[in-house]
Amino acid sequence: MPQNNLSIAFYNLENLFDTINDPNILDDAFTPDGELGWNASRYAEKLTKLSRVIAKIGKAETGTAPAILGVAEVENKKVLRDLVTTEALEHLNYDFVHHNSPDERGIDTALLYRKDVFEVFESRSYSLHIKNDEGLRDFTRDILYVHGKLDGIEVFVLVNHWPSRREGVELSNPKRIAAAKRNREIIAEIKARHPEARILIMGDFNDDPQSEAVREHLVSTDFYNPMIFLLTRYAGSLTHRGDWYLFDQIILSPNWMKAYDNPLEYVKSVIYNPEYLKEPEGRFKGNPLRTFAGDNYLGGASDHFPVYVVFKKS
């Protein structure tokens, strides 16, 4: 029965910026005078669309919205507050955890959670120290660590947004390997204090489940990646030049998988890709309907589909 299930999700929100210029980050394009013409109307429309998506993620299996939802590409606490107080979400009792990261574009990760099912004990951000081609520090997103209680069960969540492939897959691969190793350092810290910890690693990894950084440096024998079978030639969480990718993943420690004496047991993982989130026609039919394609405003929710995992409550 749906009420015996809960879902955990991740969603890259594609540049959720407010309209106010912040001199400390590269957000000029997302202002009324910027090249994208980002204004109050477009901002409100994006919030409305994102909130309606979030309210429906996992609802078929659980009867409600996700218990917790990791997000990427959010500018600040204001956009998160604006999001959780939208008409579609305000009755769901969401709050959020957010720490500013040093990313030069000002896009951070965050964790939304329903206060009726999740209690935050502690949170912090872990920096990732990598270098660019000139040997200078490449400022990128922190890893968000949240320790809390989900439906009465103690859990640890790591929310990631790994370095992009913009300079090329091979050239940028060492940066994502470094991000994977940083996660493993945090996991080692958690396990030193809590050997039987229930851990969730989620995020936009800018890599597929079978990519080197994920497969060889993050997911070893002590973790399970339930997303590994979801990527096909015809399905993923985003597209690039006609190919599907599954950069958005939720990875589990094995204690979520136990089939007996398990208060929260893994049931399935899903790409949430209903028709209303897709390009309806033309050359890109079926792709995520994004907010912008280059400088062209399309008015969609995001260039990524959300992903989620369903658990059964005993």
Image (cartoon, rainbow, N blue to C red):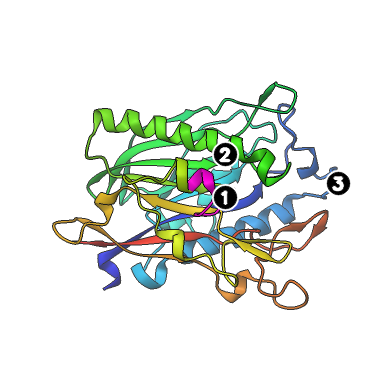
Which range is magenta?
A: 208-214
Q: Residues within 10 Å of mark 3 (few under 14, many from 20)?
A: few
Q: Residues within 10 Å of mark 1 (few under 14, many from 20)?
A: many
The residues tagged by marks 1 and 2 sit, at their Cα atoms, a distance apart of 8 Å
**Residue reaching furthest to the left:** 261
Secondary structure under the numbered disc 3 in the rendered image: loop
The residue under label 2 is 176
Q: Marks 1 and 2: CB-CB under 8 Å?
A: yes
Residue sitting at x 26%, y 40%: 197
**Residue reaching furthest to the top:** 136
Left or right relative to 310: residue 165: right
The residues tagged by marks 3 and 2 sit, at their Cα atoms, a distance apart of 30 Å
Residue type for callout 1? Asp
Image quadrant where one finds the N terminus? bottom left
Q: Position of residue 99 (x, y in %)?
A: 51, 32
Q: How many marks?
A: 3
Residue type for callout 3? Glu
The residue under label 3 is 35
Residue type for callout 2? Arg
Secondary structure under the numbered disc 1 in the rendered image: loop
Q: Can see residue 150? A: yes
Q: Marks 3 and 1: CB-CB under 8 Å?
A: no
